[in-house]
């Protein structure tokens, strides 16, 4: 595998890097990193001997063929400017952010570009990563991307149309579901006096067990409900409350994420236009 340059070792950049290293899918010498605040990158190099820290993004581009961009959308302008002197048609650029269209990115760089939207679940070498490929991507690039991300996730290809909602489910989903489960814990505490610790323990292990049932394909989501809902039993009573409050709730979630996404896309476009004017 070619050397991989990870740019931005914040939350997601470091999660991906550590997932590959702990999975032994990559060795530290196959990676070079750079972060705007150097201390974050240095800490990783101390933890994983052999991992190189570049002094600049130009150095990352000069010493690696795959560039994994793990910065936020608003940080792309500066980053692309820093990379420009060293970028060639032989690089493969992978962005992990959603609001920047691949077509837009292709106008700024000479190399093939792809998007892989990861998920925090990849930290456990689990969950999905969403892949979208730009027009310069070859079959070989696809294979390389799939093989790299399959060591820590289930990579699947998505079209731009469904990228947002797919990412809402796979990347934002862990936050949404943990919020709901947090409510279960708090209400159990409030309504019955069960300790926070005990409720957290029960909820956590219920979720792990449920994940196992799905993983082992012993049940699907609908058959799980059917089997737990004993006719005339207690679960059905509890579900009545959920049936009142939950339908439509995720429609609102998706409306909000899509609106924020459109806002971010617009902001990026404006930023890029202003940037071009200034130069
Ligand atoms: N968190 C998640 O679960 C997921 C996040 N994503 C996407 O990943 C992207 C990054 O998110 P996240 O990791 O949470 O954000 P963070 O802010 O934690 O990480 C971004 C990092 O990029 C660094 N950075 C910014 N500009 C540069 C530059 N020019 N050169 C080098 N490093 C730079 C920042 O440095 P500094 O230390 O100076 O701030 C920071 O460490 C976002 O677009 C997000 O949508 C995608 C899927 C899931
Ligand atoms: O909250 C965010 O913007 C990112 C996108 C996917 C997960 N986290």
Image (cartoon, rainbow, N blue to C red):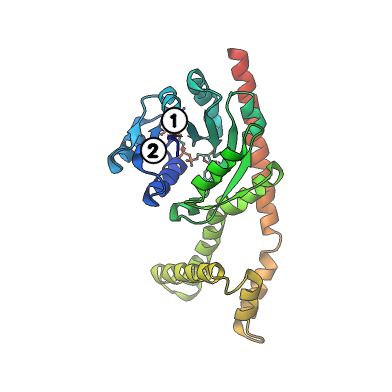
Q: Residues within 10 Å of mark 1 (few under 14, many from 20)?
A: some
**Image-quadrant location for residue 200:** bottom left
Tell me: residue 175, above or below residue 273. below
Report the residue that reaches farthest toward the front: 140
Q: Is residue 208 left or right of residue 103?
A: left
Tell me: residue 104, above or below residue 27. above
The circle drawn on residue 30 is: 2
Disc 2 element: helix
Disc 1 element: loop
Q: Position of residue 191 (x, y in %)?
A: 51, 73
Q: Mark 1 vs mark 2: which is more N-terminal? A: 2
Q: Position of residue 254 (x, y in %)?
A: 67, 50
Residue at x 44% of width, y 30% of height? 64
Q: Is residue 192 left or right of residue 263?
A: left
Q: Is residue 69 left or right of residue 257?
A: left
Q: Which residue is mark 1?
A: 64
């Amino acid at each position: 595998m070619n050397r991989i340059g990870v740019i931005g070792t914040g939350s997601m950049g470091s999660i991906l890097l550590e997932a590959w290293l702990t999975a032994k899918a990559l060795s530290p010498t196959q990676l070079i990193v750079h972060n705007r605040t150097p201390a974050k990158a240095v800490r990783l190099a101390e933890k994983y001997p052999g991992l190189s820290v570049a002094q600049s993004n130009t150095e990352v581009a000069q010493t690696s063929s795959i560039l994994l961009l793990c910065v936020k959308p608003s940080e792309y302008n500066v980053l692309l400017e820093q990379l420009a002197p060293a970028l060639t048609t032989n690089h493969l650029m992978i962005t992990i952010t959603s609001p920047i269209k691949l077509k837009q990115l292709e106008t700024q760089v000479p190399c093939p570009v792809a998007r892989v939207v990861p998920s925090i679940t990849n930290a456990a070498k689990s969950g999905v990563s969403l892949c979208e490929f730009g027009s310069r991507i070859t079959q070989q690039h696809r294979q390389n991307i799939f093989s790299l991300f399959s060591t820590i996730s289930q990579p699947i290809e998505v079209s731009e149309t469904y990228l947002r909602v797919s990412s809402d489910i796979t990347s934002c989903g862990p936050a949404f579901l943990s919020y709901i489960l947090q409510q279960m814990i708090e209400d159990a505490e409030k309504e019955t006096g069960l300790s926070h610790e005990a409720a957290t323990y029960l909820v956590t292990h219920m979720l792990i067990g449920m994940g196992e049932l799905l993983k082992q394909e012993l049940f699907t989501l609908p058959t799980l409900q059917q089997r737990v809902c004993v006719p005339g039993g207690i679960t059905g009573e509890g579900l009545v409350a959920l049936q009142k409050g939950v339908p439509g709730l995720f429609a609102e979630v998706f409306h909000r994420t899509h609106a924020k996404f459109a806002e971010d896309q617009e902001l990026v476009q404006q930023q890029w236009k202003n940037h071009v004017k200034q130069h």
